[in-house]
């Protein structure tokens, strides 16, 4: 199955500034890639120069009298922010596919439009998911640490044995755009594909993967489990002791959705006891203060929430949000408008 070209074509668009400035004030809660900031300069920009996550109160104060807010994943925007900015705030754009950090109901009630950036980050996220799988399964970080330690004594037949992936079963929880991009890559590794979603997909969308109507049934066949479902209240601590016990022996767990999807106590216990072989994690509960016990485990590969972190992808995410604002100004509803 060919890779979707729409994504790459869109990502190469440099995003020229629109000609007529609309006289709107925008609070930018995190620094954006250079090309995105350049294109956003058609607005009067108020930047959060510290480039840190703000408390809801700090955010509301900083964005007072602004028409729009540009933000990203992990910046909480609860009801209190919408209530404080009611009457002036017209729209929020988040450079993320996830929007669990924004109270959409409050946005709707306060008449604030919300834009997000789906579609343009699927391929980059899928690359990172595969990178986590490979690193965890082949113990790449341990190998790298050994090379740097000066303690490598040379080849040994039993050194750093990982697990083979060809012929193993990949279980994809959440077969949306990112799940399908992961599935296309895993098919090339010769893995057997399985997935769970709310509904079964058409054969074209499912890349030949077998559908499981329950998450539990999927876990039972997941030699490598990919947690790709969007973060939501229902999925908090989804992967708990009971569900980990359903996984086959020596399984690998990959998480690029939201850290809260995993019960850290349960996963750490399973890694410590070698109940599972390894995990590759890009997202964590309470980022950046992730559970320090992970650092002591040799069988977990950790990355700092970088699944969509390529220049092309972040540019495309920023341009999509700005395109949404432009459509809003022109009285059109963009596809990436959530409410
Ligand atoms: C998202 O898009 O939701 C990621 O977590 C950050 O880019």
Image: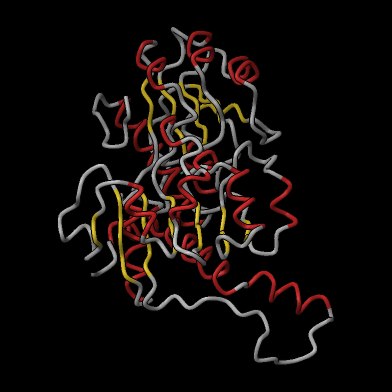
Along the viewing direction, whichever of 231 and 75 lies nearer the viewer = 231
Left or right, 225 with respect to 271, comes to: left
Along the viewing direction, whichever of 10 and 268 lies nearer the viewer = 268
Left or right, 7 with respect to 125, comes to: left
Along the viewing direction, whichever of 266 and 20 lies nearer the viewer = 266
User: Where in the figure is residue 135, as x and y percent of width and height?
Assistant: 57, 69
Q: Is residue 101 above or below residue 3?
A: above
Q: Residue at x 73, y 54 (%)?
A: 295
Along the viewing direction, whichever of 273 and 111 lies nearer the viewer = 273
Quarter of the image for the N terminus: give it. bottom left
Q: Is residue 224 above or below residue 97?
A: below
Q: Residue at x 55, y 26 (%)?
A: 76
User: Where in the figure is residue 216, as x and y percent of width and height?
Assistant: 36, 48
User: Where in the figure is residue 125, as x and y percent of width and height?
Assistant: 45, 56
Q: Residue at x 49, y 51 (%)?
A: 244
Q: What is the quadrant of residue 13 in the picture?
A: bottom left
User: Where in the figure is residue 148, as x and y percent of width and height?
Assistant: 79, 76
Left or right, 281 with respect to 329, comes to: right
Q: Is residue 142 above or below residue 129?
A: below
């Amino acid at each position: 199955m060919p890779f979707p070209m729409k994504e790459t074509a869109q990502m190469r668009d440099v995003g020229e500034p629109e000609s007529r400035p609309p006289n709107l004030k925008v609070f930018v809660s995190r620094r954006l890639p250079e090309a995105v900031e350049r294109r956003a300069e058609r607005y009067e920009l108020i930047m959060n120069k510290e480039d840190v996550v703000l408390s809801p109160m700090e955010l509301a104060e900083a964005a007072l009298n602004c028409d729009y807010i540009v933000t990203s994943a992990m910046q909480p925007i609860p009801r209190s922010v919408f209530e404080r900015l009611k009457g002036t705030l017209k729209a929020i754009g988040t450079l993320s596919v996830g929007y669990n950090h924004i109270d959409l109901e409050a946005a709707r009630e306060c008449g604030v439009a919300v834009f997000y950036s789906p579609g343009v980050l699927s391929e980059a996220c899928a690359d990172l998911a595969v990178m986590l799988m490979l690193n965890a399964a082949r113990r790449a970080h341990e190998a790298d640490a050994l090379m740097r330690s000066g303690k490598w004594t040379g080849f040994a037949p039993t050194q750093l044995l990982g697990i083979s992936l060809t012929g193993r079963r990949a279980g994809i929880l959440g077969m949306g755009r990112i799940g399908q991009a992961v599935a296309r890559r895993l098919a090339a590794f010769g893995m057997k594909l399985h997935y769970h979603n709310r509904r079964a997909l058409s054969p074209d969308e499912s890349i030949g993967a077998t559908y499981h109507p329950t998450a539990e049934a999927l876990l039972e066949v997941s030699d490598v489990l990919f947690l790709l479902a969007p973060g939501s209240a229902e999925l908090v601590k989804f992967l708990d002791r009971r569900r980990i016990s359903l996984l086959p022996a020596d399984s690998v767990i990959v998480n690029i959705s939201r850290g809260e999807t995993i019960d850290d106590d349960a996963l750490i216990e399973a890694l410590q006891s070698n109940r599972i072989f390894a995990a590759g994690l890009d997202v964590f509960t309470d980022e950046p203060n992730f559970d320090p016990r992970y650092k002591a485990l040799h069988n977990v590969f950790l990355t700092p929430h970088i699944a969509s972190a390529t220049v092309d992808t972040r540019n495309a995410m920023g341009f999509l949000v700005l395109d949404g604002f432009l459509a809003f100004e022109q009285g059109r509803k963009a596809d990436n408008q959530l409410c």
